[in-house]
Amino acid sequence: MRIGVFDSGLGGLSTLLACLRYLPEAEYRFFGDVAHAPYGDKDPALVRQWTAEAYQRFLTAGVDAVVLACNSATSAAAAPLREQSPVPILGLEPAIKKALDTEEGPVLLLATTLTVKGDKLRILLQRIDSARRVRPVACPGLMEIVEGQASDWRIAAQNYWRERLYPHFEELQPSGLVLGCTHYCWLEREFRQWAGPDCRVYDGNDGVARHLWRRLFGTEAPLPGALPRSARIRLEFSADADRKKKLARDWLASRGVQLQERVRDTRIRPLSRG
């Protein structure tokens, strides 16, 4: 079984890890469209185009399913792609419902500008009775801090929290914090620390992994297992491939996952700029 996982950069590796807990034996193709990152502040029409081209690349590779491990790509492109796809397309949604079902207090949603302003989030909130408890906050620039992986990126992220996000947190006093971008999951431990013990942190990775299982096998997903010590993962990036692949390998290794086969760095043609 071969599964394609797509993101605008490194963030979607957190989604891939969630999928590995359910499908450790699958072969994964991970593609990060670094050449056009970040998606969160781009025109939705361009994001749809780039996502569609990545999807076609996965079909050519013979995948059995495509996971859009990017909230912005999901918001812009998931619906039209599903209309013609011969394989399941799974998209990320912020774990708002899970947070609201678990928490009694307000919920703070952190996401990209495209996600916050997109119709998909608006429709999702309309479907949830208690959505009035949710405050969406756009976080322009935060994805770039994570993706850039500069030597001081964690300090830069902490400053971003203190200066731009903590005022919302202090005013709302949320009992739940939803990470609406997979890049933010690279800071999950920090967010838990910054939010404190009275605020739980949520993301949509486990939900999309369970949904992937249901679409592939037609049954409810089992309980997630431990991460495998090794996995079949082919890493591809549309720019800066050598550095991005090393960062990806190092991050996966920090979670205890080694790549089974050492494949040479794959440089692929950047997706068209429209």
Image (cartoon, rainbow, N blue to C red):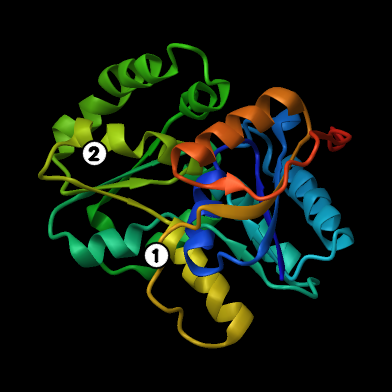
Rendering coords of residue 67 (x, y %): 63, 59
Q: Comparing marks 1 and 2, which lies closer to the viewer?
A: 2
The residue where tag 1 is placed is: 126
Amino acid type shown at disc 2 = Arg
Q: Is 248 positioned to the left or the right of 32 in the image?
A: left
- Tell me the element at label 1: helix
Position of residue 49 measured from the top left corner of the image (x, y, whole percent): 79, 47
Q: Which residue is mark 2?
A: 192
Query: Which tag, 1 or 2, sits closer to the chain's start?
Result: 1
Residue found at the far left of this picture? 198
Amino acid beneath label 1 = Gln
The residue drawn where x is 49% and y is 26% is 146
On the picture, is 91 further left or further right than 241? left
Foreground of the two, 90 or 30: 30
Can residue 30 be spotted in the picture? Answer: yes
- Which quadrant of the figure contains the C terminus? top right
In contact (CB < 8 Å): disc 1 and disc 2 = no
In percent of the image, x 55 and y 41: which residue is there? Answer: 114
Could you say which quadrant of the image residue 84 lies in? bottom right
Q: Name the residue at 89% across, 34% down.
A: 269
